Amino acid sequence: METNPTILGPVNRRAFLRGAISITGLGLAIVTTPWGLEVLLAKDVESKGFRPVAWFFIREDGRAVILVNKSEMGQGVYTALPTIVAEELEVDLGQVTVRTAPADEAFKDPGFGMQMTGGSTSIRHMYPVLRFAAAQARQMLVEVGAKKLGAEPSVCYAKHGRVFAKGKDHGLSYGELVKDAAKRPLPSNPRIKDPQEFHYIGKPLKRFDTACKVDGKAQFGLDVFLPGILYASIARPPAFGAKLEKLDETRAKTILGVRQVHVLESGVGILADSLDSAWKGRSVLGVQWGKGVQADLDDALVERIFREDLQKNGVEVKHAGNVPKALDGAAKRLEASYFLPYLAHATLEPMNCVAYVQKHKVDVWVPTQNQTMSQAAAAEVAGVSPDNVFIHTTFLGGGFGRRAEVDFVKEAVGLSKASGKPVKLVWTREEDIAYDFFRPGNAARVIGGLDTQGNLVAWSHRMAVPSISSRWNPNDLKDGIDSSAIEGVENTFYSIPNLFVEYVRVDMPIPVGYWRSVGHSHNAFVVESFMDEMAYLAGRDPLEFRLALLKDNPRARRVLEALGEKAKWHEPAKEGRTKGLALHFSFGSFVGEVAEVSVDKETGIVRVHDVWAVVDCGPYVNPDIIEAQIQGGILMGLSAALFERVRFGGGGVESKNFDTYRLLRMPEAPSIEVQILNTNEPQGGIGEPGVPPIAPAVANGVFRAAGARVRTLPMTPKGVKEALGKA
């Protein structure tokens, strides 16, 4: 009976809001109130004026339908969310239908203030309220069922979407009860199931969206086609901020199938009958660009700017104790500088969007993490009200924060408006890398001090990092501090009596954005690398050194102790290998990782053979999804640690495709084992926390293997050999 839920495409907003989707059963709305999230009967939402973030129905055919405001980009929300509902409602998974909510004010995430998927928040935001709503519905159905069965509610129970009275085989289906249940008031204190009663939550269940992805029924952005559609490509400036100086369309229009050429803010668009024709038209387009805002920008200049900015005094972020005094009195002292490069998102599915601008209506089919900003951007470009923009969210072929941006949406809408036709814009891989909103680079200088017993008594941390918030949300820049740049440092979980953290904002024309785990992705490398350096300076085991700093954090201690046991830390590694470890807290979850590595001292090549990870994310829904997300995060973080770096030259990006922007390859992937701790700690996210610890774990393993302390990423053979020369 436990077949997969039904996963359908997005609901049409106009149809839904006008009531064309007729749900004559029991409807509940999860709404935002001044007191937080609450559940109302669907019929009461409009009259009370609250804003729903999700809708939950039980229809007369007994099916449970949840309308969710989240995008599915591989993180498993289309599996986890129906699991939560099915569990608490007491229905089989095959009785659940999941639909993507339309883009609308009604579906904003209360934590973000917009309809967006990111920050490892989907389950954290929806888990408690979905359970509560389902428990309310279950209790209402049991009460109605008890009355019809002539029994007391206390002796009735729900199972497999039916209500039974104890001692009786006959039960009533939910479909038979929903009409009467909808007339009852919502119970204010329904019984929430005890975890010991769970059938689904906490159990390994296969992904529900696997089948539709395998058989091709899942619709990604690239799968959208419309009658009469035109295909678009865009000629873009080679340097940041370069302006169009001269345009000659003549040769482009000689290409068979090229229909129109239009100038956009971001470049020159070519519209054609096929994508091939659009690309060919772009290749022969007569276009001349200016030099850009910083024509001499290259790798050397980028690194020089970071190094110079690191010498400046920053804005104070955190100040505990007296760091200068503690450092002056330290028995041992160490200073180290680190540099991490800009990174591209490199999603499997390049940016794409289908837009159709009509007289008073705009339809957009897009793999987006950000429905609110997509809707607003389309409305602005098309010159219509947001109420007349309909966002059809498809499956996402990777997001990682890149698809929270709306630049590609604006381009598709602009070209459709100019042509009066539906337009399908598809970026090439080269565009996707060169015109990204990159993970910011990072330069950091850390000074640490030890007392005579080898205890860490002082830590001074200065970081020079570009600001994401200055573009995304300037209001987040409090006292000149970008919260995403400092995360993972200012909220350290270690007990350090004297701590000073400062931030220097780096300003360059390189656009930056959110990249999986954001600031944690670079700050964890610096913190956990330097923590290892201090352990060796103290002559102590890196794991034991960290445990001594976690006396006030039992949760972190449990993770680290479990990691030591899981990875057999105190046992010798395999011949020719050594182990390095790192621990980090991000998005509400602790993740510790140990990497077993080998280093070829002749070539400088680092190989990661095995990785062990221990996770504490609090109560969880599906351990299979957690394991997959941690594995994916480790592989992404490992790719960044060993290979990835955006190269700059001529005022723009020189990295173009996977030949010049190197990614981890399948033969280079290590064996990964994941252990999930079963705890009652506050629920954390899981999509991003696997990324931050892997780079420092590998770097720390490299030091144990070769005595070379690598402080610059990626760990290229050249960089490792240089570090060996300094060892």
Image (cartoon, grey):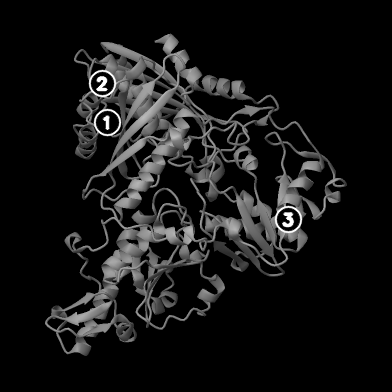
Seen at 52% across and 20% down, the residue is 307
Residue 81 place in picture, x, y as percent: 36, 61
Residue 346 place in picture, x, y as percent: 54, 41
Residue 93 place in picture, x, y as percent: 33, 68
Compare marks 2 and 1 and give the one earlier in the sequence.
2
Compare marks 3 and 1 and give the one earlier in the sequence.
3
Q: Distance from label 2 to label 3 (Cα)?
A: 63 Å
> Which quarter of the image is occupied by the C terminus?
top left
Is 102 on the left-hand or right-hand side of 502? right
Give the residue at the far right of this rendering.
250
Q: Which residue is mark 2?
A: 456
Give the residue at the far left of this rendering.
167
Q: Amino acid at mark 1?
A: Tyr
Residue 431 place in picture, x, y as percent: 65, 42
> Which quarter of the image is occupied by the N terminus?
bottom left
Q: Which residue is mark 1?
A: 494
Secondary structure under tag 2 reads strand
Sort mark 3 into few (<14), some (14-19) or many (20+) by Cα contacts within 10 Å.
Answer: some
Sort mark 2 into few (<14), some (14-19) or many (20+) by Cα contacts within 10 Å.
Answer: many
| Above-or-below relation of 356 to 683 | below
Q: Distance from label 3 to label 1 (Cα)?
A: 57 Å
Asked whether disc 2 touches disc 1, contact meaning CB atoms under 8 Å apart, the reply is yes
Q: Quadrant of residue 111?
A: bottom left
Q: Amino acid at mark 3?
A: Ser
Q: Distance from label 2 to label 1 (Cα)?
A: 10 Å
Q: What label does residue 274 carry, if any?
A: 3
Is 86 on the left-hand or right-hand side of 17? left
Sort mark 1 into few (<14), some (14-19) or many (20+) by Cα contacts within 10 Å.
Answer: some
